[in-house]
Amino acid sequence: MTTPSHHEHKTHAPGSIGCMVITCSDTRTPETDTSGQLIRRLLEERGHAVVGYHLVKDDPAQIQLWIARGTGNEEVHAIIINGGTGISRRDSTFEAVDTMLEKRLAGFGEIFRWLTYQDIGSPAIMSRATAGIINGRILFSTPGSENAVRLAMEKLILPELGHLVKELRK
């Protein structure tokens, strides 16, 4: 029996995914949130629907509230969060997200840090980018810089988004 290749798996994946974008920041406004704007633009350019965008303080309760709202929305199949993944006292996105994940996709954070290391070197160890599954949705959490967002979106998230959602629907 022949098994299909990963390319064949992707050909049957949905081409348009409903996504929620959450920016976690104590300083950005919708006008200055260039990373959130970049995520939305890249999603739309690839044919995905941005069904929600929220700018929240880097506060675990607020982050978890918006994640719960996203997972309760039938139109949302993926949540992409940016910001709050560093190690400063105010960076709490990782803790808020990690406690909610039912399954973790450890490879996302590992590969993201490896790609970041190739670009900026040892500061890559400070990133706590993560991904996983919550309530039948895929969730990605990336650093908030534009360069980090672009790297995560172009190299990891966009190439696999439809495939991941297809697998979750099995």
Image (spheres, rainbow, N blue to C red):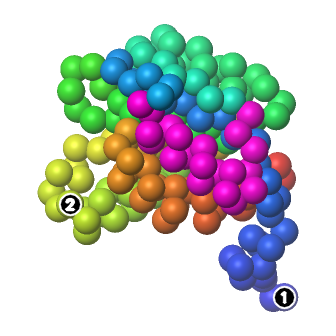
Mark 2 surroundings within 10 Å by alpha-carbon count, few (fewer than 14), some (14 through 19), many (20 or more):
few
Total residue callouts: 2
Please report whichever mark, 2 or 1, sits nearer to the chain's N-terminal start: 1
Label 1 residue SS: loop
Q: Is residue 110 above or below residue 131?
A: below
Residue 112 falls left or right of residue 22: left
Looking at this view, is 145 or 140 the one in front? 145
Residue at image point 35% right, 18% down: 26
* Residue found 51% across the figure and 13% down from its top: 62
| Mark closer to the observer (2, 1) | 2
Provide the residue span drawn in magenta.
32-51
Q: State which quadrant residue 10 falls in.
A: bottom right
Label 2: which secondary element: helix
Q: Which residue is disc 2 drawn over?
A: 120
Question: Residue 27 falls in which quadrant of the image?
Answer: top left
Q: Can you give x and y, in whole percent of width and height, for residue 135 in the image? A: 71, 31
Looking at the image, which residue is at 64% across and 51% down?
43
Name the amino acid type tagged 2.
Ile
User: x, y percentage for residue 1?
Assistant: 84, 88
Q: On the rendered structure, is 37 left or right of 135?
A: left
The answer to whether residue 50 is magenta is: yes
- Furthest toward the front, the residue is 31
Tag 1: Cα neighbours inside 10 Å, few (<14), some, or many (≥20)? Answer: few
User: Image point 22% across, 44% down: which residue?
Assistant: 126
The amino acid pointed to by label 1 is Met
Work out which residue is located at the far left of the displayed protein and give it.
Answer: 122
Q: Which residue is mark 1?
A: 1
Q: Is residue 104 visible?
A: no
Quick check: 24 above or below 46? above
